[in-house]
Amino acid sequence: MSARLLKIIADALPKILLSGITVTVPLTLISFAIGMILAIVVAVVRVLKIKVLSEFFRFYVWVFRGTPLLVQLFIIFYGLPGVGLNIPAFPSAIIAFSLNVGAYASETIRGAIVSVPKSQTEGAIACGLTSWQAIYFIVLPQAIKACIPALFNTFISLIKDTSLAANITITEMFMKTQRIVATTYEPLALYIEVALIYLLFSTGLTYLQKYAEKKLSYNSRKVQTA
Amino acid sequence: MIKLQGLHKSYGAKEILSGIDIEVNKGETVAIIGPSGAGKSTALRCINLLETPDKGTLTIAGKSYDLAKLTSKEILEIRQSTAMVFQNFSLFENKTALQNITLPLIKAKKINKEEAEKIAIENLTQVGLLDWKDHTPSQLSGGQQQRVGIARALALKPDVILFDEPTSALDPEKVQDVLEIIKRISKEQHITSVIVTHELEFALDVADKIVFLADGKVVEEGTAKEVLKNPKDERTIKFLGHFADKLEYVI
């Protein structure tokens, strides 16, 4: 490896990392947080089969799971101005990513809610708790715990998918790398460099997942294996 | 006192309960017995509205409710004046034994945390599980789980405790333990209760009144002695026939 190439890689590192920390990470965290709240609301409403709202959410999940994320980004950022709705790039990305995560994660959470034995809900309402209290205190904590691995799949997908935001003028890690490539003509080294940085962030999330699983475990009984 | 009148319940075209009347005086234990499929559990679950009754009147805590048209507020009222001990315990898996008892006290009865814990500890002591208070249900045996279930129901101080086949999911050697506890608390604390059970001996021993249910109707009703010595209905005679030897011994 030539000294020139090494210097390009070394010079690029803080720049890419900076755009990662200032754009990719906030974009991921904010979208995931909003998406999760949305997902829980959608899942609970659909499990309780609340009229109208439940149908509306079913439609929402159908649309956002069935269309490409890139198309959703384009409609929000380039399409909506056509009807007078100008949303800046960063909020546009937040909206698209949150809605997308919300649609996927709501199905994960809905499945997990349904898998918590109904007898526990009966136990709760027979004690005089309301259905909402039963869901909030008994069912959701168990459902969320059960779907931590699946939700982290969504989380890790999201951090990678934020690279699509480059298409709507957001200078996140990938766009930053593209720009450096344009001036240095070293695509292989630089794209591998940014790939490794994505891998680093994803690995960080894997550790967070382990921590979350440990934190949420209320059942310390070990399964004996022969 | 609780009074159930004209309870009807169908699943689709199949009628499960065709007009049931049950009356339980304060401090009394009523056992519902009968062949399987008679609608015993359904009747019990209609009292706290885990099943939706088609028709009937329920009088509880001095108030009468038309079971055909209940508001969600009334449903909550009825559930808060009752408590249930389930066949499969129905404990909250994400909570410890203690929290299983304090959660409904804090959230449904609005009792503060310290007071709720005091009540929970008293009731866990009653069922002999104080040492297990910080264990989750999956760390407890079936018999222990059911004792937590009983403590949870007792702690709520309801107008009536509904026992839905409380021992039928237990290991044979644990059945007696749990029955003994139910018997003891019934006698000591004068709780008002309705028990659906297959344990006939226990029913005769603990119940002030026996209700024999068959084909969705109350076909026989009275004290244990009356129902046994003088069964009027053919279905009661046939059902009790299987147990006749044992019963003579008990009485």
Image (spheres, rainbow, N blue to C red):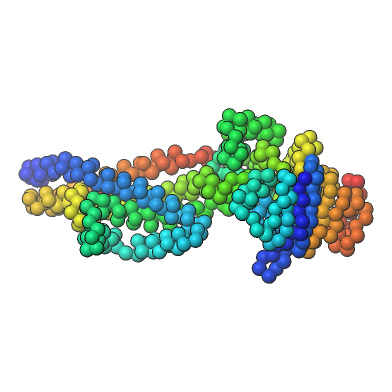
- Residue A16 lies, with reference to residue B232, above or below; the image says above
Q: Is the C terminus of chain A in the top left, top right, bottom left or bottom right quadrant?
A: top right
Q: Residue at x 42, y 47 (%)?
A: A148
Q: Position of residue A76 (x, y in %)?
A: 26, 59
Q: Nearer the viewer, residue A38 or A139?
A: A38
**Whether residue B36 is visible:** no
Q: Residue at x 61, y 30 (%)?
A: B115
Residue furthest to the front: B63
Q: Residue at x 46, y 62 (%)?
A: A52
Q: Is residue A201 left or right of residue B156?
A: left
Q: Position of residue B100 (x, y in %)?
A: 60, 39
Q: Is residue A164 left or right of residue B37?
A: left
Number of numbered discs: 0
Q: Nearer the viewer, residue B39 or A50?
A: A50
Q: Is residue A21 left or right of residue B13?
A: left
Q: Quadrant of residue B107?
A: top right
**Whether residue B178 is visible:** yes
Q: Quadrant of residue B39?
A: bottom right
Q: Nearer the viewer, residue A189 or B65?
A: B65
Q: Position of residue B246 (x, y in %)?
A: 88, 50
Q: Residue at x 27, y 47 (%)?
A: A27
Q: Nearer the viewer, residue A104 or A137?
A: A137
Residue furthest to the right: B229
Q: Position of residue B101 (x, y in %)?
A: 62, 38
